[in-house]
Each structure stands twice: as structure tokens, then as C-alpha cells.
Amino acid sequence: MPYDFEHKAHPFEPVFDKNSKLLILGSFPSVRSMEEGFYYGHARNRFWPVMAAVLGSPIPRTVRDKKDMLLRHGIALWDSAAQCVIKGSADASMREIVPNDVGRLISQSGIRHIFANGKTAGDIYNKYILPKTGIPARVLPSTSPANAAFTAERLIEHWRVVGELCKH
């Protein structure tokens, strides 16, 4: 199905609490995630299986289980962009980006480490948000199905740092 450029606002609240010690930022929800009503809703996105693997947890199936798994391990989840003009789900098409207020999350939690799920999330963070937070983000390979160069095993290898930080 062809898509036209559309102005979109981020539809989800961040997942975090006062005990969150690290933040994972995506870029902006995909069309499928918006239809599903939660982060990484595309069945082929490997975020939830990768997170389960690095945290030693079963793969969560429900939104409640996904939130619980993250919060139990001190992980916050959000996206770099609060709104943008985008064509379908294509990160490369994002323009007129308005960043999310990551500083608010940091001030309401114990977040000291930030990870970007893919290059676009990292680029948005570095351009708009890093100057306000002062916390560098580590860019990890995208879990998107569009990142076919990375097998699930390779993603787990790179994302293992998240699981290691959660143990401390």
C-alpha cells in the first residue's frame, strides 16, 4: 500500500517509573505499532524477543507483560520524536521532527544510561535531546525487520549490554 507524507503525533506515553535506570529510545512508532496500540507492535520486529533474551525472561505477549518486564528490570522505553512528518513507517522519510522531552523522564527517574534502537533514533537524540540532557546515547542495531543484515543472534549479541547494566 503506498503512503503519502503525513504529520503525526506520538500516540503512546513513555514506559518508566522512579526506579528506571536506563532508557531505550526508538525513533517513532510504525504504522503497525500504532494499529496495535503499543511500541514495537509489528510481528516481525525483534525488539521483544531480543529484550527477553538479554533479560533472561519469557517473551512477553501482552502490553501489560511488556511493561512489567521492562519496569521489573529498571528499563524505560520511549521514542526520540514526539511528532514528525513521515511517509508510512519509513524512518528515512522523517522530517519536521519535534523531539520528546527526555529530560522530564530523567528528572522523574534514576535514568543514567540511554540507548538508541537504531541510527535514526540516535541521530534524533544527538541532534535535539543530548544538548539538554548531557547523557550520551549508545546506538544499538535496529530491531526493525528492515534491518535484515542483523540476525536475531547478532542483535542479541549487541543488545546484551542492556541486560548486563540491568544486573547492577
Image (tube, rainbow, N blue to C red):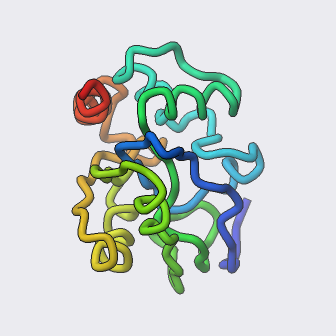
The residue drawn where x is 45% and y is 22% is: 52
37 vs 96: above or below: above
Where is residue 93 shown, x and y percent of the image? 51, 74
110 or 71: nearer the viewer: 110
Q: Where is residue 27 in the image (x, y as percent from the top left)?
A: 47, 61
Q: Residue furthest bottom?
A: 96
**Residue 120 in picture, x, y percent from top left:** 38, 64
- Viewer-proximal residue among 7 and 160: 160
Is 35 placed left or right of 30 in the picture? right
Q: Which residue shows up at 45% across the image and 48% down it?
A: 146
Residue at left offset 69%, top offset 30%: 64
Query: Which sits in the foreground, 129 or 7?
Result: 129
The N terminus lies in quadrant: bottom right
* On screen, residue 4 above or below 65: below
Q: Residue at x 77, y 49 (%)?
A: 35
When asked about the image quadrant of residue 63, the answer is top right
Q: Is 164 in front, or is 41?
A: 164
Q: In the rendered view, tell whether residue 76 sits above or below residue 150.
A: below
Q: Using the image, determine if residue 3 lies above or below residue 70.
A: below
Left or right: 131, with 57 as reference point: left
How many numbered discs, if any? 0
Q: Where is residue 75 in the image (x, y as percent from the top left)?
A: 43, 39
Q: If the image is split into quadrants, where does the C terminus sit? A: top left
